[in-house]
Image (cartoon, grey):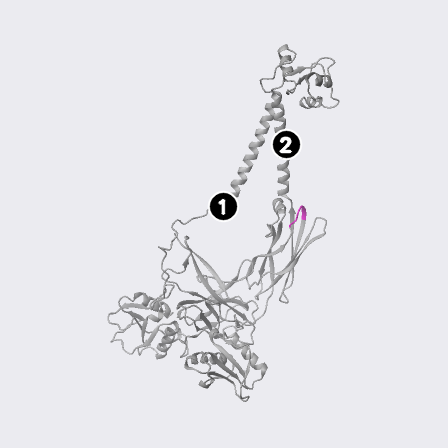
């Protein structure tokens, strides 16, 4: 059975975040590495305004909040909006035609130790023929599982792949076009969440959902707002649905299904709903559309019909039993001079009862020759028997009369019809009801699999650790040495234990070739995949290699990213780095700005700003007290320099605080 994949796209949606911290604990996360304090939301999203043909180098910050090593897959994708207007990043296998095709990452898969983070460089290049206006996409990361990717849901054939993404927006300068089209305006009613027994029974506890579709025909994103007014058949306004935002629509995109809710529903008659659309952006214009609503209380009508049927059926049943009771009554033939009063006295029966049994109405007269049924009772039973024996009364009827038989047929037809209708309703309601599956092979505590543990070769999820693979790189003299340096830095960024080797025992190849030791074929395939070259790469098993894998490097330098010497650096999670900020001559306003900046960068500054002993400090100085803090101090200083500030690092063991760094903000 082919396994289905459910993508739970956990997009980093910082709708209006003033500042951003690292992601939730016990997870992996992703953020921009170099937020610009002058660009709103750049601490949560990548926001660019690059021209046609222009490139920009940047980096993404990947954070491992888990207590175990993980292997991360990283890739760029295009963005879209869901049917209701929400932002969404496309799946990994979706075609890339926009930002997903413009971003080139330095590494697409790498290893990350517990409670650490790594900066992965990338380059975004805008094609010369790209459309003017807004473009959206993002960089997505997901944890690599073992041979069987994803976590299976117990008892199903479904696997879950969890992805975390960060948005990327690019606006190509040029002539702006703003246009739209209302593609849909429909309505339907749905039950309210709040319950009311009587209203639910009558099916009038409902709300009206107005479904709106909009298409962006321009080249910049638009943010529509809509409101709906409802008028009855007399032209009177019966509802004014409040204005609401219905998502963001990217150029050439369409919001097919957004909703506005009226907390009531039309009851009876003809209504007209009028939609009015405007936009947060200026210059887009407005639009209107109308829809006619015909309302009828079907449930109430069905209930009234049902009550009418029950009433008729009850009356027929009553009449049937009344007629059936006459079969046991003797019959008297009226003679001249008889009245209901005289007959009542003769047979000891109340005259009203006698009239009712024989269906005699006002003026309660009887005719000679008319046959009357005489009800029996304890008072007159002996009299009736005697009169039957004397021939003065006809004996009870032994066969049912035609009127009784006809009413019985009608009753049976009514009952059969009700049963058939109830059966149809039951079948229609439950024919598509999903079956509740039970897994008889549920695992018990005795046969449940052991909790996986991290080893030197594999992560908890079963992925092979790249740091466990020893890689040698040999670059022949026919290739540029810089290619070997770039390849070394790339493989170290990915997490391999890589180093340059000077000798390959005279072996030469005409193409880039990966040699691997016996039993290391899977590791060789991993390295081949991570090279990221478009050229052919050969594989060859070699005994006595001395390494797990050796790369005979003929890759052109242009195919490899240009990385710094510290590109393979893995640092402590920034949110675990505490920083005490001291004002050392820059003034309170500037110091507050620096404090906010490092918070946006993911570090954890103290709430209160302290005062440095000297007020003539120059630039920014990061002070650490212990060698264990050096990497974190260098990371903080590097972040400040990338943000446009002059920053240096100093060691001062006399500070005595090994739990936090000190940042002195000078002039």
What residue would you read off at disc 1?
433
Residue farthest to the top, as pictured: 390
Estimate the spatial distance between the alpha carbons at disc 1 and disc 2, rounded to whole Å: 35 Å
Q: Quadrant of residue 526?
A: bottom left
Residue 276 shows in this picture: no
Q: Residue at x 54, y 89 (%)?
A: 616
**Which quarter of the picture shows residue 482?**
bottom left
Quadrant into which the C terminus falls: bottom right
Q: Position of residue 536 (x, y in %)?
A: 34, 68
Magenta residues (range): 265-270
- The secondary structure that most of the magenta stretch takes on is loop
> Which residue has dot 2 on it?
312
Q: Is residue 384 left or right of residue 149?
A: right
Contact check, label 1 and label 2, Cβ < 8 Å? no
Q: Is 511 in the magenta?
A: no
Q: Position of residue 513 (x, y in %)?
A: 31, 70
Q: Position of residue 299 (x, y in %)?
A: 62, 43
For marks 1 and 2 on the same chain, the one whose residue lies earlier in the sequence: 2
- Residue in the picture at 53% in, 38% down: 424
Q: Is residue 297 left or right of residue 559?
A: right
């Amino acid at each position: 059975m082919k396994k289905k994949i459910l993508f739970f796209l956990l997009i980093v949606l910082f709708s209006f975040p003033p500042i951003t911290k690292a992601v939730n604990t016990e997870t992996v996360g992703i953020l921009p590495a170099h937020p610009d304090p002058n660009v709103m939301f750049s601490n949560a999203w990548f926001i660019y305004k690059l021209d046609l043909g222009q490139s920009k180098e940047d980096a993404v910050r990947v954070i491992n909040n888990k207590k175990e090593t993980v292997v991360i897959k990283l890739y760029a994708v295009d963005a879209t909006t869901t049917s209701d207007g929400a932002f969404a990043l496309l799946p990994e296998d979706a075609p890339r035609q926009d930002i997903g095709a413009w971003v080139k990452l330095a590494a697409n898969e790498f290893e990350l130790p517990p409670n650490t983070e790594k900066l992965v460089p990338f380059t975004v290049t805008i094609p010369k023929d790209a459309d003017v206006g807004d473009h959206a996409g993002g960089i997505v990361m997901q944890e690599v599982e073992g041979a069987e990717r994803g976590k299976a849901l117990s008892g199903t054939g479904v696997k879950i792949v969890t992805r975390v993404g960060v948005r990327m927006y690019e606006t190509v300068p040029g002539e702006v076009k703003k246009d739209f089209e209302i593609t849909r305006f429909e309505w339907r009613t749905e039950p309210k969440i709040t319950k009311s027994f009587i209203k639910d029974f009558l099916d009038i506890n409902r709300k009206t959902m107005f479904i709106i579709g909009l298409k962006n025909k321009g080249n910049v994103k638009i943010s529509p707002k809509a409101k709906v007014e409802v008028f009855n058949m007399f032209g009177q306004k019966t509802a004014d649905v409040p204005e609401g935002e219905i998502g963001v629509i990217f150029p050439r995109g369409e919001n097919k299904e957004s909703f506005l809710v009226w907390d009531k529903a039309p009851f009876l008659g003809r209504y007209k709903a009028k939609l009015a659309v405007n936009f947060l952006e200026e210059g887009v214009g407005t639009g209107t559309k109308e829809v006619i609503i015909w309302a009828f209380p079907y449930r109430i009508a069905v209930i009234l019909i049902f009550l009418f049927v029950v009433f008729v059926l009850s009356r027929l049943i009553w009449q049937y039993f009344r007629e059936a009771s006459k079969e046991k009554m003797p019959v008297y033939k009226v003679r001249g001079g008889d009245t209901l009063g005289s007959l009542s006295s003769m047979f000891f029966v109340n005259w009203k009862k006698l009239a009712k049994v024989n269906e005699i109405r006002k003026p309660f007269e009887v005719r000679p020759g008319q046959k009357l049924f005489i009800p029996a009772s304890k008072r007159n039973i002996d009299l009736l028997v005697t009169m039957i024996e004397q021939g003065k009364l006809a004996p009870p009827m032994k066969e049912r009369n035609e009127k009784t038989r006809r009413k019985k047929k009608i009753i049976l037809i009514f009952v059969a019809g009700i049963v058939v209708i109830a059966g149809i309703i039951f079948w229609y309601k439950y024919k598509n009801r999903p079956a509740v599956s039970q897994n008889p092979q549920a695992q018990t505590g005795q046969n449940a699999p052991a909790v996986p543990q991290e080893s030197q070769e594999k992560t908890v999820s079963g992925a092979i650790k790249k740091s466990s693979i020893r890689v040698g790189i040999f670059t022949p003299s026919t290739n540029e040495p810089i290619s070997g340096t770039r390849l070394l830095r790339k493989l170290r960024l990915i997490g391999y234990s890589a180093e340059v080797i000077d000798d390959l025992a005279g072996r030469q190849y005409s193409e880039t070739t990966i040699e691997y030791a016996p039993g290391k074929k899977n590791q060789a395939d991993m390295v081949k995949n991570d090279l990221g070259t478009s050229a052919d790469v050969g594989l060859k098993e070699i005994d006595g290699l001395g390494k797990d894998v050796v790369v005979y490097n003929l890759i052109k330098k242009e195919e490899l990213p240009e990385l710094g010497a510290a590109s393979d650096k893995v640092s402590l999670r920034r949110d675990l780095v505490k920083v005490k900020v001291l004002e050392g001559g820059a003034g309170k306003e500037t110091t507050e700005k620096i404090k906010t900046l490092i918070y946006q960068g993911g570090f954890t500054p103290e709430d209160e700003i302290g005062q440095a002993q000297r007020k003539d400090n120059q630039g920014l100085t990061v002070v650490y007290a212990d060698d264990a803090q050096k990497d974190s101090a260098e990371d903080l200083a590097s972040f400040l320099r990338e943000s446009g500030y002059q920053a240096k690092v100093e060691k001062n063991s006399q500070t005595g605080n090994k739990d936090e760094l000190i940042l002195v903000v000078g002039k």
